[in-house]
Amino acid sequence: MALLLPLLLFVLMLNTQLPARDFPPITRIDAIAVQSQVFEATSPRRPVLIRSAQEAADYFPVSDLARLCSEVDFSRQVVLLFAWRGSGQDRLEPVEDDSPPGGLVFVFSPGRTRDLVAHHQVFVLRSDVAWSIR
């Protein structure tokens, strides 16, 4: 664990030295694990906003943290982590907001089944993208 932080800082340093590129407004990261305590810290209406690799270390296992840090440029992007337990039919989808000033709206649709399923979704947003939850 003591070697994790220097490794992540090195990855971040390499990431910021890459040539400037245009990032899409939103990207979903699939097949990434989260730590179990995330489910107490967040919900579909209250995500965790992650602005650095150090903050991400609190929510992701080491192997997935390295992958996340290699895909995210924290100087230009942020990570939104949604995690909750609920119906297996629960859905959370980002939708482009047409009303001024624009941006993204995350729409949560609760399911109707009584099963209890752990859900988590990780989105990478450009830092300048406005977002809200409906």
Image: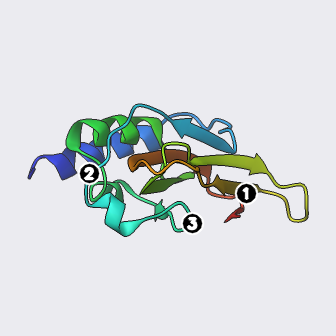
Residue located at (58% from left, 50% from top): 112
CA neighbours of label 3 inside 10 A, class few (<14), some (14 to 19), many (20+): some
Q: Nearer the viewer, residue 17 or 41?
A: 41
Q: Residue at x 52, y 47 (%)?
A: 113
Between marks 1 and 3 in the image, the one whose residue lies nearer the viewer: 3
- Res. 105 mark: 1
Can you identify the residue that label 3 sits on?
Answer: 45
For badge 1, the amino acid type reads: Val
Q: Which numbered mark, 3 or 2, is in the foreground of this view?
A: 3
Disc 2 packing (10 Å; few <14; some 14–19; many ≥20): few
| In the image: residue 121, left or right of residue 68 | right
Quadrant placement of the C terminus: bottom right
Residue 20: quadrant of the picture:
top right
In terms of depth relative to the viewer, which is nearer, 36 or 18?
Answer: 36
In this rendering, position of residue 125 left or right of residue 73: right
Crowd class of label 1 (few under 14; some 14 to 19; many from 20; radius 10 Å):
some
Q: Are marks 1 and 3 in contact (CB under 8 Å)?
A: no
CA distance for labels 3 and 2: 19 Å
Q: Which residue is mark 2?
A: 35
Numbered disc 3: secondary structure: loop
In the rendered image, is residue 15 in sight?
A: yes
Q: Residue 87: give x, y in percent of width and height.
A: 49, 50
